[in-house]
Every structure is written in structure tokens, then in C-alpha cells.
Amino acid sequence: MIDLGVLEATLSEFTADAIRNDQGEVIIPVKPDRCLALLTMLRDEPAVAMRRLLDLSVVDREARSPKRFLLVYALDSPTLGHRFRVEVELDLEEAEAGEVDSVTGVWPVAGWLEREAFDLFGIHFRGHPDLRRLLLDEAFDGHPLRKDHPRDRRPALGEGERAR
Amino acid sequence: MSEASLTPSLSRDLGIVETIVELGMTHPAVRRSLPGSTLGFIVQLDDDRVTGLEVEIGLGHRGFEKEAESTPWHRAVAYASRLGHASGLSAEMAWCGAVEGLAKVWLPDRAIWSRTLVCELARVSDHFARLAAVTAALELPLAAQAARRAQAGGLDLLDFATGRRVPGCWSRLGGIASALPSEFGLRWQRDGAEFEELLARFEILAVRNPTCISRLRDVAPLSAEDCLAWGVSGPALRAAGIPSDRRRDAPYLGYASLDFDVPIGETGDDYDRLLVVVEEVRQSLRLVDQCWTVLDGLPPGPINVDDEAWPARGTGTLATPDDSREFEALLEGPPVPAGAFSFSVESSTGELGFFIVSDGEGLPRRVRCRAPSFFHAQALPAMLNGARLDDVLPTAALMHLVSPECDR
């Protein structure tokens, strides 16, 4: 398990503090505008070597939190054998204005992950080369994993003409 | 690809600029459906060289994450087990492991070892399914037949062990639905030997078959670095030489005390992937042996946590008809404290994990499923650029794209 003290110096210019939660997971909060720089550093810094973006998930916290959306980047270092979560908070305007940069240039795997976050949550990523819906039809209305999207709303028949 | 542009091209001579071929999607129930079935491939060709490939996903999307967020924790086990074929059993165990991890619930020994054993049996069945799909795509019917027989045998054995066919839905939060029958040992002696024999036959008919070697060697290679960049996991990542395996790196269930090897390849081409899968079947057979030895030696004991609040005991029926506390627990599910947790298992397709967030209320706040097939489908174009059209289906089969998992 990595010693967080080693990271403190490198992390200090990006974010206030990395924490370890009670499950032993390392969580690094960061502001949207510093996210891309931090993730690039975590990949390239040999002491951390986060070579793999394992997953990108979004949590819709509604009004429970001043910033509604939480972006969670799960990073993995297969050589050093540790994992981090980088968390970015966004409110609705920031999410829809694309305040967070795409990381497709750092890990190509982000291409589909960000498209999925756009599709299901309506999060925009600045600089994504091809931000289209991925799992749902182009004609689908809304972003179903947002908590204010009713679970039983079905698109009307005939609406779903595939755009290809 | 520079190589492709140097080769003489009949299409170019005839003035054909590009050819587009659509493969799939097919219905999963069609007998000779494509690997991954509801995935569609749009292949752009120069002669028979692939110059562009678009993988279309989403046709099987059924809102798994939304459904799981709208239902109490214990009922999503049934959704999770529909994420794969036999590997659905690994998916439901990943789900249970995530929830149990967040709630800090420790399973009784019998449940741990039964789950480990069933995980490995599911891997045997799914790996044989993958081998059958590859050899069918290469038109090696005898090898495909041997693998398919073993796959079916694996499903029969899972049926015998858990009392369920596919989808399993055999795990429960805090335990399992039914104990393995005590005659499993006898049955395993016979079936285990048969799997060994079918695997040996498969090796002669496919692995050492010159046709198979020439069709898979140097096809669709993906370097270790590219595998990481594309988020590849499972046998495909190990074939590229990275010994990454959740059972070894972050042992869950009983894996920490089991003896098994993690096979790796060198070049990460299709043939290395085949070799890794074949060797993993052999390792899984070893693991089933060891799990049964442990399980057989355990003293009688419970298969579920002894806690009224964790309701899904046994078959989910009430101990007494008027036990209202147990009835309530069955309706509402177990109490899961507020927090976030991620947990993943090594499924036959790769690293399958859940990231869950709880508010401490009845329903999950967030359920995120990391499905390896999703990542592998996205990596296919990078593997197949410059390959031949003929290579698309064997490669897709070797990556074992499972569409319910990919589309969720």
C-alpha cells in the first residue's frame, strides 16, 4: 500500500489533500479545471504510475450536496499494484457547460467512458473528439441515470429512428 | 496501415474506393449467432484488409444501473446474474461482495468456499464457450464440438451444484441460496476427468493444429502498453504479458489460500490469447479440486450470516408464516451504511467490478458496473486495424464479448 506522505509534495500543487477512507481506499479530490493536469501527472509520475484508467463513474447527489454531480475516476497501477479514486465535483451548469476537460488524450479508453457519462448523465467534456450518445438512441430525450429522470418513462414508439 | 497500402489491391485497380461490410447484429438465440451477438460491426475494407472498424453497442441496453438503483440492495442480485452467461454467477458475486464489503459483513466459511468453487466452475464453462466460438469461427468443427460438449457439461455441473441453470441467481447478500450437495465430490471425480480429457482433445484438434496456428499467430496483436491505454483486462491483458489477476492481486473469497498459476503470454496476439485461455481452464480445474477438498473437510455450519436483518436466507421463504420481522426484512433488504465502496472480481471476461454509493437509506444512491466487455469492444478497432476481414470474428470470439455485460 502506497504511503500518502510520499505523494504530498507532488499533489500539493493540484489539490488540498488526499484522504484514505475507512475502507482503505485512497481518494483525491480536485477542482474541475485542475483535473486533466492532475490525471496526466498521476499517469506519468513514476512513483505513482497510474497507467490504466479503470473506470469513470458519475454520482448524482441531487440537493444533498452543494455540487450535484460527482465524477469518479478510478485509476490503477498494474506495475505498483495500487489504486486511487480521483473525484471532481460539478454543479449542473458546470456539467452542461463542459467545465471539465476530456482525458481522451491521456487514456484513449476515456472515449467511450465519457460518451457514456454524456449519454446517461448529460455531462459534457471539453475537447472530446466525438461526444455522441453511446448506449441510447440518438433520438432519446433526457439522461436516464439522473435522479430526476423517472424510472418508468419510456420513449414513445416511432421516436427511436436510428440515426445512421 | 503502411503495409496495407503497399500490397496490390484488386479493389483499387477496379476503382473501388472503399467497401463497407456490416457484421451482426444477430439475435442471441440464433444458433450460429456472432460472438457478442447484439454487437454490430461496421467494417471498412480495402480488399480484405480492415482499414476501419466501428463497433456498435447499446442494442441490449436495459438500464441495469437504473433498475439496481431503484430496488432494495438484495434484489439486484437477480439483475446482476443476468449480466453474463455462466459468468453471471461471478457478476452476482461481485455485486454481493461490494455490498457485503460496504456493510462489513463477513461470510461463514461454507459460503466462502462454495462461492469460490462455483466461480471457478463458471469460468470453466465460459472459457470452453469461448474456445468453442473461436474454433467455430475458424471452421474447426471437431474442436468446436469438444469445447461445446465441455461447456454444456460445465452448465450441467453448475446446475447440479447450485440447483439452477443460467441465469444462476444463487448468491444471496450474506451467503448463498443453497449448499452444494454432498454428492458433488463423486460427480466431480467423473466430470473433472472428462473436462481434462476434452481439454486434451481440444489441444490436439485446435491448439496444435497448423491451420489454427497460422490463422491466429500474429493476428490482432495489442501490446501491453496499448492494453493498459484501452483498459483491457482478463486473459487478453495477461496474453500481452502483464500478470494482472484480481484473484492474485487483491484476493477475495478463498483465493488467498489456494494454489494456482497465472499464465501470461508474450506478444498479445490471438494465439497467445488462446493459449492463456486454455491454461486458465486447467488452473480452474485445479482450483475446483482444492475448493472441494476444503469444503468437504469443513464441519457442518451455516451458509448465511446469522443476522435477521440480512434476509435472504436459504430459499427466501419465511421460517414461520407469521414472522413479521423476517417478512419486513425480505421486503426492505438489509441495512447498508452510508459510504462508497468499489469491489471487483476476476470474471471469465476480465475484471468485473461494482462501485456503489449508499446514503444509508433503503435504496442504493449509485450502482456502477465496470463491465470488461465494454472496454474490450472499444479496443477491438485498435487490435484489428490492418487485419483481414476473416480475422474479425475469431478475434471477437477470443475477446469473449458478452453483450448483456457490455450494454448493461
Image: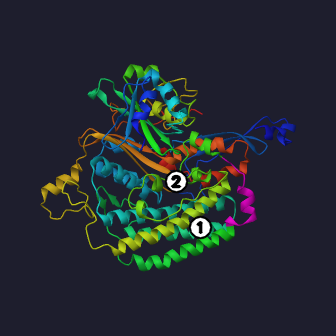
Q: Position of residue B106 (x, y in %)?
A: 28, 56
Label 2: how many residues lie within 10 Å, few (<14), some (14-19) or many (20+)?
A: many
Name the residue carrying label 2. B349
Which image quadrant for residue B172?
Answer: bottom left
Magenta stretch in the rendered image: B206-221
The question of residue B28 being in magenta is answered with no
Depth check, mark 2 against mark 1: the one in front is 2
Q: In which quadrant is the C terminus of chain A drawn?
A: top right
SS state under label 2: loop
Q: Is residue A155 visible?
A: no
Is residue B87 positioned above or below A4 on the image?
below
Name the residue carrying label 1. B147
Q: Position of residue A145 (x, y in %)?
A: 38, 35
Tell me which amino acid carries mark 2.
Thr
Earlier along the polypeptide chain: callout 2 or callout 1?
1
At x 30%, y 51%, the residue is: B100
Q: Position of residue B244 (x, y in %)?
A: 52, 51
Is residue A31 positioned above or below A23 on the image?
above
Q: Position of residue B329 (x, y in %)?
A: 19, 53
Label 1: how many residues lie within 10 Å, few (<14), some (14-19) or many (20+)?
A: many
Q: Is residue B240 toward the left or the right of residue B284 in the image?
A: right
Is residue B46 positioned above or below A69 on the image?
below
SS state under label 1: helix
Which image quadrant for residue B40?
Answer: top right
Question: What's the distance in space between the residues labelled 2 and 1, CA to CA?
Answer: 17 Å
Closer to us: B2 or B54: B2
Badge 2: chain ID: B
Q: Is residue B320 toward the left or the right of residue A58 in the image?
A: left
